[in-house]
Amino acid sequence: MKVIRTAELPAGRVVTCPKGGFISHRILLAADNVGYSMSKTVIPAGEQQFWHYKNHLESCYCVSGKALLTNATTKQYWAIGPDTTYVLDNHDPHWFEALEETVLICVFNPPLVGQEIHNESGSYSSDHRSPVYDVRSVHISKIMANDYNPNSVAPPEMALLETSIWEDGYTQPVVVVYDAEKDMYVVIDGFHRFRVLKESARIREREKEMLPVVVLDKEMGDRMASTIRHNRARGSHNIELMSSIVAELVEMGKSDRWISSHIGMSPDELLRLKQITGVAALFANKQFSASWEAQHSDPVVFEDDEAA
């Protein structure tokens, strides 16, 4: 059992935000081994902050003060006052404006580890643990497939997967990213496990339409690379779709070196995929001699271009 007095917290557990000056008293942290962290946050009157906790779920109980909470995606807003709790259960980007000094008790999961401060995106960084330590349950209506997965499973294997999940349950979470604009979780890896939940009535009923997921914080190019890395480690690919993905990454400005290093592809393999697309623009920044002899094939090497 622990009894903690906020006024007696050591200096290392009192964090002042460099922007706005609000103060966070870190009452419980990951080191306290209770599975969550708890903070007392004091926000000065007139202070307006944008927060977007991509790596944490947060619940806040208002002890005193008056504030306006606005969902940055939906534009919906609420008055926050004493004895009011708001819950950011979908990593909701939001604005918080203190109309008068406001005191909140904030609970984070996974727990904060120390003196985190908000980064430019309004988020706290993760503690660098693997995502699998933060498995969440998300309703199937909030999950969507990506449109760039180059991996496929034949019908017999899909039937076996359905039987496996029916007999053993979900033993691996689906890997997703959260798309704030769509307010949806987009599948990075585990599309076929997601399909089973959508298509199997008996599994959907048993799981109450909830899917176990882990959430990565990735931009679009990195999302594609993550999907390919997951799939290449264990299966075959649709070559045409892989070629299309390479084309998209090039159009995003990713260099050959970035593509190869991030999705585990040799220079020769990357060149072949570019050739399959037949899109000349993929070679726009490359220099070729006026002619060459077909019987001589030199190994493909990267230019010393800066990785995108």
Image (cartoon, grey):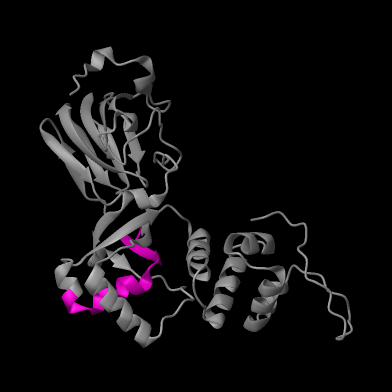
Q: Is residue 182 above or below residue 147?
A: above
> Where in the figure is residue 65, as x and y percent of width and height?
17, 26
x 64%, y 64%: residue: 260
Which residue is most to the top?
8
Left or right: 66, with 115 as reference point: left
Q: In which quarter of the image is residue 252?
A: bottom right
> Where in the figure is residue 259, as x and y percent of width and height?
62, 63
Q: Quadrant of residue 60?
A: top left
x 15%, y 69%: residue: 206
Left or right: 122, with 255 as reference point: left
One can see residue 100 in this view: no
Q: Does residue 193 show up magenta in the picture?
A: yes
Left or right: 291, with 111 as reference point: right
Q: How many marks?
A: 0
Q: Does residue 245 show up magenta in the picture?
A: no
x 28%, y 77%: residue: 162
